[in-house]
Image (cartoon, rainbow, N blue to C red):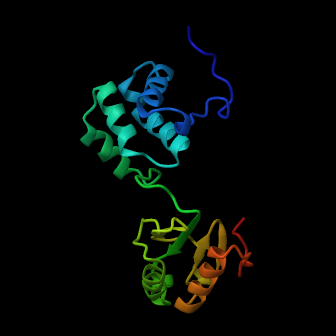
Amino acid sequence: MKKAKGTKKDDHLNQGEEAPEQLVKRLLKRYDWKKGMLIPMMQDIQEACEYLPMQVLKALSLKLEVPLSQIYSVATFYAMFRLAPPGEHQITLCMGTVCFLKGAGKVADAIQKEFSVEPGGTSPDRKFTFKPVNCVGACALAPVMIVDGRYYDAVTPDSAIEILSDIAKGKTVAAQASTGK
């Protein structure tokens, strides 16, 4: 008997309460075992786990009879998917031409060094996930750093480290510019 679909919240899959095989089994039932629903299944896994754990992807590969390499290529092709747990705070740093010319490269280097985080990665303490991007469309504010949706304009290596250190300590840091909304 099929369960009637409720709201997205009702359908939320909590991986913390389920073994990978059970999570995958529920997804396969939900999507009628259709290989063409791989991306929505992966989105649901990420919603449940906050990222795509390898053990869950392996179980999905085995049960759906899709090569793990194909699932991995989908996971790495789409920027929305994460293969590692996200940090508590999300850092987006604009690396567009104007931001780069105004020092975004130096800001990126400082963030990487200070917090031991690589582009696209998460710091060892899981405080920060660092994502340099091509452009955020706020060139007049260059260089721009966005932390948890708050825009910080004209950041320097020192100001970026100060902002992020305060955030890591739980301090509220006022955004320096509008949130773009």
- Hey, which quadrant is residue 2 in on the image? top right
Q: Residue at x 60, y 15 (%)?
A: 3
Instruction: Answer with left or right where residue 9 lies relative to residue 92.
Output: right
- Hey, which quadrant is residue 176 in on the image? bottom right
Residue 89, x across and y down, in percent: 59, 66
Residue 18, x across and y down, in percent: 51, 32
Is 16 situated above or below 82?
above
Near-viewer residue (10 or 165): 165
Is 154 situated above or below 66?
below
Badge count: 0
Residue 24, x across and y down, in percent: 43, 29
Instruction: Answer with left or right where residue 142 lies relative to residue 65.
Output: right
Instruction: Answer with left or right where residue 13 lies relative to residue 109.
Output: right
- Hey, which quadrant is residue 1 in on the image? top right
Q: Which quarter of the rendering shows the C terminus?
A: bottom right
Is 3 situated above or below 100?
above
Near-viewer residue (75 or 168): 168
Near-viewer residue (169 or 25): 169
Q: Residue at x 47, y 69 (%)?
A: 123
Residue 178, x across and y down, in percent: 73, 74
Is 71 situated above or below 65?
below
Q: Residue at x 28, y 26 (%)?
A: 65
Instruction: Answer with left or right where residue 8 lies relative to residue 132.
Output: right
